[in-house]
Image (cartoon, grey):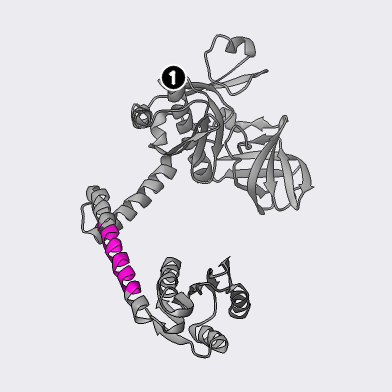
C-alpha cells in the first residue's frame, strides 16, 4: 500500500521513499513505492514524470505513473531492487500545468452544470489542451459569457478546498460525479464555481490558474465536445496567436485589431481577380480552338495550369481540329494533369499504354480520358509522336 503524499500536499516536489516492488513489463519496469508524491494517471489527468535518485547517486528517469488498487507505480527504463531507499523528484512544470488545467476544467464544468444543468461525461487532458464532453448542447452565444465568468472566478482568487468524507457524510454534500462512488470520497470545492468528486491534483486558489481560454465547440454524441486551455498552456497559445496576427498585420499593412477586415478585403479582391483570370483563360482557349481548326492531331501544354484547364482546352479543341487532342497542364517538377479527347473515337487502349509508359493513372469515357503523369515534357512528346507522326505541338 502506497501512502499518497500528493493527496496531503499537491505542492510537494521532492520526497523520500522505499521501493516495495519491481516488475518488468514490455521492456519497462513498474517500481512500487511505500510513499509517493507522483500522481498516477486517473480521472482524466495523466501520470506524473520526474526521476528517482538512488542511494549511490544514480538517477533513473520516471516516464509515467500508474496506480493499481492501493499501490502507486512509477514507470522506469531501469530496475530498482526492493528495499532500496530513493529520493523522488517531480517534473514540476509538467505537474503544475496539469494542476492549472484540471482546476480550470472544474470551473468550466461547474459553471456549465450550474447554468445549463449539463453533466461532464468525458474528460481528457492531452499534451497541451483539455477535452470535455457534455451531455447537452450549449448555444453559441453562451460561450463568451461562460468564458468571461470562468476568468472572473480566477480574478476573484477563490480558495480551492479538498475534503475526504465517507459515503454517509457525502450524502449531505451536493457534488458532481460521473459515477456512483463508494468508500472514502474526495470532494474538491471551488468557491463560487464547483463542487465535484475528484482524485486529481489542484491549485490552492483560482488565481494560480492565470487564464482560461475556450478553443472549440462542436456537437458530439447528442451533446457537445469542447476544447480548452488554462494557465501556461493558454498563455503560450495566445502568444503564438499574437505573433501570427502581428505577421499578418505587417503583410496586410493593417492594425493588429483590424486584420480580420483586411483579410476579408484581400479574399474578395483575390476572388475578383481569379474570376477575371478564368474569363481570360476561357477566351484564350476559344482563340486556340479557332486557330487549330483542321489541324489534325494536337498536343498542347499549359505550364502551371490545373486539371480543369486541361479538360476545357481538350473539349474545345477536339470540336475543331479533326483529330486527337492531348492537353497537359503542370510542369516537369510537379507532374502533369492531362485530358485526351478524340471525337467519335476510342482512346482507352492508347491512354492505358500512355499511363504505363509515362508513370500515369487515369480513365474516363472512350472518347475523353483524363488523369495524370509523372514524366517530363520531352518524354510525353516522344511517346505521342511515336503514335501520331503528324502531331502538332503547341502551348496555350
Task: Assess whether residue 144 is covered by the magenta stretch.
Answer: no
From the viewer's perspective, tell me whether residue 311 is left or right of residue 372. Answer: left
**SS at circle 1:** helix
* Quarter occupied by residue 392: bottom left
User: Which residue lies most toward the bottom here?
Assistant: 389
From the viewer's perspective, tell me whether residue 86 is left or right of residue 228. Answer: right
Q: How many marks?
A: 1
* Quarter occupied by residue 14: top right
* Residue at 33% in and 68% down: 282
317 is higher (above) or lower (below) than 87: below
Specify start and end residues of the magenta stretch as a single range: 269-286
Nearest the camera: 273 or 300?
A: 300
* Quarter occupied by residue 290: bottom left
Q: Give percent across and percent down for residue 147.
A: 37, 32
Nearest the camera: 301 or 236?
A: 301
* Residue at 48% in and 32% down: 105
Task: Assess whether residue 279 is covered by the magenta stretch.
Answer: yes
Q: Give percent across and percent down for residue 130.
A: 50, 38
274 is higher (above) or lower (below) than 117: below
* Residue at 44% in and 86% down: 393
276 is higher (above) or lower (below) than 373: above
Give the residue at mark 1: 114
Q: Give percent across and percent down for residue 179.
A: 62, 22
* Residue at 43% in and 68% down: 306
> Badge 1: few (under 14), some or many (20 or more) residues near its Cα, within 10 Å?
few
Nearest the camera: 86 or 223?
A: 223
Q: Quadrant of the C terminus?
A: bottom left
Nearest the camera: 125 or 287?
A: 287
Is residue 332 visible from the viewing direction of this image?
no
Amino acid at each position: 500500500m502506497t501512502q499518497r503524499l500528493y493527496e496531503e500536499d499537491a505542492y510537494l516536489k521532492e520526497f523520500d521513499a522505499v521501493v516495495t516492488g519491481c516488475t518488468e513489463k514490455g521492456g519497462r519496469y513498474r517500481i512500487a513505492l511505500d510513499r509517493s508524491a507522483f500522481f498516477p494517471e486517473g480521472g482524466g489527468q495523466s501520470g506524473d514524470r520526474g526521476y528517482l535518485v538512488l542511494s549511490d547517486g544514480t538517477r533513473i528517469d520516471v516516464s509515467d505513473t500508474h496506480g493499481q488498487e492501493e499501490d502507486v507505480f512509477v514507470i522506469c527504463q531501469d530496475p530498482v531492487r526492493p528495499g532500496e531507499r530513493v529520493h523522488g523528484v517531480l517534473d514540476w512544470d509538467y505537474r503544475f500545468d496539469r494542476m492549472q488545467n484540471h482546476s480550470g476544467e472544474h470551473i468550466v464544468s461547474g459553471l456549465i452544470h450550474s447554468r445549463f444543468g449539463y453533466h461532464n461525461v468525458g474528460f481528457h487532458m492531452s499534451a497541451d489542451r483539455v477535452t470535455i464532453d457534455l451531455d447537452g448542447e450549449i448555444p453559441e452565444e453562451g460561450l463568451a459569457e461562460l468564458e468571461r465568468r470562468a476568468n472572473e472566478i480566477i480574478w476573484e482568487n477563490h480558495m480551492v478546498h479538498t475534503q475526504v468524507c465517507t459515503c454517509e457524510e457525502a450524502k449531505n454534500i451536493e457534488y458532481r460525479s460521473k459515477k456512483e462512488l463508494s468508500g472514502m470520497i474526495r470532494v474538491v470545492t471551488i468557491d463560487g464555481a464547483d463542487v465535484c468528486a475528484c482524485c486529481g491534483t489542484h491549485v490552492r486558489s483560482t488565481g494560480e490558474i492565470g487564464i482560461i481560454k475556450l478553443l472549440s465547440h462542436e456537437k458530439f454524441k447528442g451533446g457537445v465536445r469542447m476544447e480548452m486551455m488554462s494557465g501556461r498552456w493558454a498563455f503560450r497559445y495566445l502568444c503564438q496567436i499574437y505573433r501570427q496576427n502581428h505577421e499578418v498585420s505587417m503583410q496586410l499593412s493593417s492594425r493588429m485589431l483590424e486584420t480580420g477586415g483586411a483579410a476579408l478585403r484581400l479574399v474578395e479582391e483575390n476572388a475578383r481577380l481569379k474570376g477575371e483570370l478564368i474569363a481570360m483563360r476561357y477566351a484564350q482557349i476559344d482563340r486556340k480552338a479557332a486557330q487549330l481548326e483542321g489541324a489534325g492531331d494536337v498536343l498542347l501544354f499549359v505550364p502551371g495550369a490545373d486539371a480543369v484547364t486541361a479538360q476545357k482546352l481538350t473539349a474545345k479543341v477536339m470540336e475543331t481540329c479533326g483529330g486527337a487532342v492531348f492537353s497537359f497542364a503542370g510542369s516537369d517538377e510537379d507532374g502533369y494533369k492531362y485530358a485526351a479527347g478524340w471525337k467519335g473515337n476510342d482512346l482507352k487502349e492508347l491512354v492505358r499504354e500512355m499511363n504505363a509508359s509515362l508513370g500515369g493513372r487515369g480513365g474516363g469515357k472512350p472518347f475523353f480520358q483524363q488523369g495524370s503523369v509523372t514524366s517530363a515534357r520531352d518524354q510525353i512528346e516522344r511517346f505521342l509522336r511515336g503514335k501520331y507522326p503528324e502531331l502538332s505541338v503547341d502551348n496555350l
